[in-house]
Amino acid sequence: MPADNSPADFPSLEKVDSPNGSPPTASLSSLMELENCVSNLSLAHEIVVNRDFCFKPRSPLEGRVTEIVHQAFWDSLQEQLNSDPPNYNHAVVLLQEVKTLLSSLLLPGHSRLRAQLDEVLDMELIRQQVDHGALDLHKLAGFITNTMASLCAPVRDSEVRALQDLKDPVELLKSIFRVLGLMRTDMVNFTIQSLRPHLLQQAAQYERTKFQQILEKHPDNTATWLQAAAEEEASACGTRCDSPGPDSRGPPSATAVLNRAYLRLLGWDPQDDKYPETVLMDRARLDALGRRLQVLVLEASVLLVSGSQFGGVISPLRGFVGKLGQSVAALLEGSRASREADLKAAMLGLGEVVLKQVTEALSNQGGGALPQESQDLLRGQISDLWRQNNPVRTLIGERVQDFLLAMLQGSLAKRSPELPFPLGLLSAELAELGMNFRQIVHFNRTVFGPFYAPILRKLLFPTAEHETGEDSR
């Protein structure tokens, strides 16, 4: 079957040649090339996907460690400047560094400022002044701080002004370097914001090209990931079709398999290192969404169990169900719900907390005490939710999965259907999670559609693929 006759839902972006053959043995140089390739790709991907991405100044701990390491240098500078006559060897080196940093902050239109910088911080002239004992360090520092004031972002104005109050030359130079570091970070982030619209236009082709280089040096787990999704989707189709008709006997669609594959990433086993290469750039984001999804499923499961047993009693209580959901969410967020042992302990404690809230709510409304049998039943049902195969948890998980699939298919874009209890109470959280998930999936499919198409065609139409190979010989 020719490639042009593929089903309409196959990814069909511009063709990119797929790698063939075994990956070469990695030498030291090739590993370094791969590391640089991955580093550049990760940075570009983060800029495109994360609208809030920016470089940040060093953390206080980092700054403290650096300060300790460099303290010997500053102590030496202090000794040199206090000697008689003063020794400016270290100071001259620092002035050269300051000039370099200031030059890096200048824009092409700063020709006058660049000329002033070259004139005042003329290193040859400064060395001559040192030789003749005529160097005025405070005058140079004043020029530097004034130049910084004309270049810095408004957010740095107060810090630059504070430099003018420093009299000790060592403290002044240390502070100048600190503020220049912040200004350089500001400049980098401004450049990133300026480049983002242009990078967005080129991002798909750039990532595709970079990924081709990575795939040539790295094992391919992507096909295995898609194959598992195809098998799972075929099984789900068989379960849904109680009375298969002529149209239901064909293979699942490529879109359905891809969506199923993306959903599998939200529940990926951390111990499984066969993560698909095409999604590695977003693994941290998807892992975080997966953890959030698990908390929402557990929260909804607790609400369903509580509502099923006491719905007739607690439903009329104004705002009670919403407050209960907030308490459940807070308790689950505070536990390490990704580990079964921790989750089991959390659910045991959660049963007691929910039972206490239900009892207090009923008491405030003048209701009687809950029968012990009802208390034990609620406590037991909630504590049992730690099991992945718990029927309530499974049911909620399937409903949430259907919601996310609908978002991927775009069927929720024009309408917001009423979600059944208790998911309706979590509609805002589910919508936010779904939007973030869909954004990642959409960009990934845009970039790697050409890589997925031949794999999916081979999985879903093996006979046609074989015939195509026969015809090509």
Image (tube, rainbow, N blue to C red):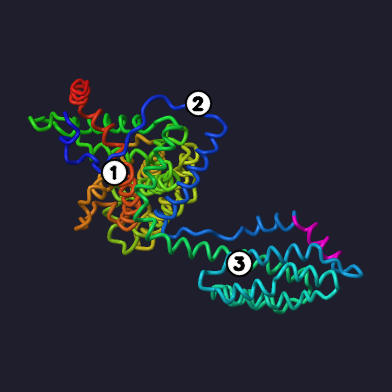
Disc 1 marks which residue?
A: 401
Instruction: Give the residues in magenta.
Output: 70-80
Q: CA distance from mark 3 to mark 2?
A: 44 Å
Q: Earlier in the sequence, mark 3 or mark 2?
A: 2
Secondary structure under badge 2? Answer: loop
Q: Secondary structure at mark 1?
A: helix
**Residue 168: image x %, image y %?**
79, 73
Asked if residue 72 lies in the magenta stretch, the reply is yes
Please name the residue that numbered disc 2 is placed on: 25
Q: Is residue 430 left or right of residue 354?
A: left
Magenta-colored stretch includes residue 344: no
- The single residue placed furthest to the right in the displayed view is 84
Q: Amino acid at mark 2?
A: Thr
Mark 1: few/some/many CA within 10 Å (<14, 14-19, 20+): some
Determine the residue positioned at 80% across, 70% down: 128
Q: Quadrant of residue 121?
A: bottom right
Q: Which residue was labeled with disc 3? A: 103
